[in-house]
Image: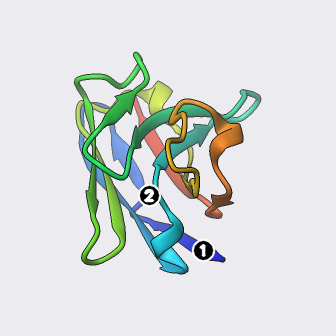
Amino acid sequence: QVQLVESGGELVQAGGSLTLSCAASGSTFSTNGIGWYRQAPGKQRELVAGVSSGTSTNYSDSVKGRFTISRDRATNTVLLQGNSLKPEDTAVYHCAASSMVVPNLRSQNDYDYWGQGTQVTVSS
């Protein structure tokens, strides 16, 4: 089992920045791909960014160039840094982990573990 705990969500003004953290514990050796997803009220959950067990990353078009995902295996932590935030970035952000050898980072079905989420609100 893997436990994921997100932190760092807050209220920020448009144009601002923040960094979300996802801390993994438990059988972390079984985590390969890690993804950040978000869900806004009334909308479906969508991929924000994903990182493989190597260095491959994947970003949604809506955040490409503004968000950066990074992984620290020594501390079992994955960060999501967001810059130039927009009101449409407002959502609950969840991190997810996949035990698949080569997961499709863009497919929610490939993730086995999910965190509870952290709220990000961007005011205009």
Residue 15 percent location from the top left of the image? 24, 31
Q: What's under tag 2, amino acid-wise?
A: Gly
Residue 37 percent location from the top left of the image? 55, 41
The residue that disc 2 covers is 9
Q: Secondary structure at mark 1?
A: strand
Q: What's under tag 1, amino acid-wise?
A: Val
Residue 45 percent location from the top left of the image? 67, 34
To which quarter of the image does residue 26 belong?
bottom right
Query: Which is more toward the observer, 30 or 4?
Result: 30
45 lies above or below 51: above
The residue that disc 1 covers is 2
Q: Residue at x 23, y 36 (%)?
A: 83
Disc 1 to disc 2, C-alpha distance: 21 Å
Q: Is residue 48 left or right of residue 72?
A: right
Q: Is residue 113 left or right of residue 4?
A: right
Q: Secondary structure at mark 2?
A: loop
